[in-house]
Amino acid sequence: MPETAARDDVKGQELQLGLHGQRLGFRVRRLHHLLSQRVVEAFAPYGLRPGSLTMMVLISANPGYSQVELSRIGNLDKSAIVTIVDDLETRGLAIRGRSSSDRRRNSLFLTAQGEKLMKEMHQLAMATEQPLRDGLSPEEFDQLFELLEKARALVATAS
């Protein structure tokens, strides 16, 4: 009983992060988790898998690229991409075409329906970030973007 009583005493208090409070990765992961939850809720009516919008955006921006190339660009798991692309293709949102230079390679393209849905979903995804846009000045928001990209590049090139 004393444990339960002790837990009841701290109910409503904010959980302390301890040493994790000093880790950038932990803070970035917490923000990513919150934004991802909002995106999953916003996309629920579409019945698409997590990662579908990312894949559609990458295909749209890089028409004709292969799944392997897009997985590298988006830092996505290759096996997850296969499932996502299969789903997009089944729904008529994307098509696979054989590469004329390498018949073993599939080139990916969005259909007109896929382009339209991607734009709708992108607007929903942008809306999930609105609390950040509302709470930061435009300069702070731009700086956040720049710093996150700089941090990503530094970690990517570190040996």
Image: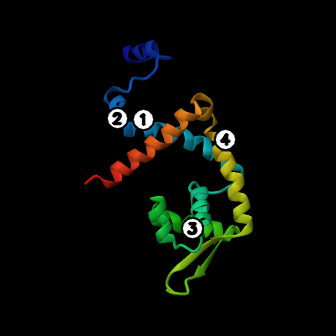
Q: Residue at x 61, y 56 (%)?
A: 53
Vertical position of residue 153 compared to residue 5: above or below: below
Residue 109, how many percent across, how many down?
63, 72
**Disc on the earlier residue, 1 or 3:** 1
Q: Earlier in the sequence, mark 2 or mark 4?
A: 2
Name the residue that disc number 3 marks. 62
- The kind of residue on which mark 2 rests is Arg
Residue underneath mark 2: 23
> What colour scheme governs how the chains and residues are painted in the rendered image of this protein?
rainbow
As measured in the structure, the alpha-carbon distance from the residue carrying label 4 to the one carrying label 1 is 21 Å
Q: Are marks 4 and 3 in contact (CB under 8 Å)?
A: no
Image disc number at residue 127? 4
Distance in Å between CA atoms under marks 2 and 4: 28 Å
Q: State the residue at coordinates (65%, 57%).
A: 48
Where does the image place residue 39, in percent across and percent down from the top left?
Answer: 61, 45
Q: Nearer the viewer, mark 2 or mark 3?
A: 3
Instruction: Give the residue number, with chain letter if any, for mark 1.
Output: 27
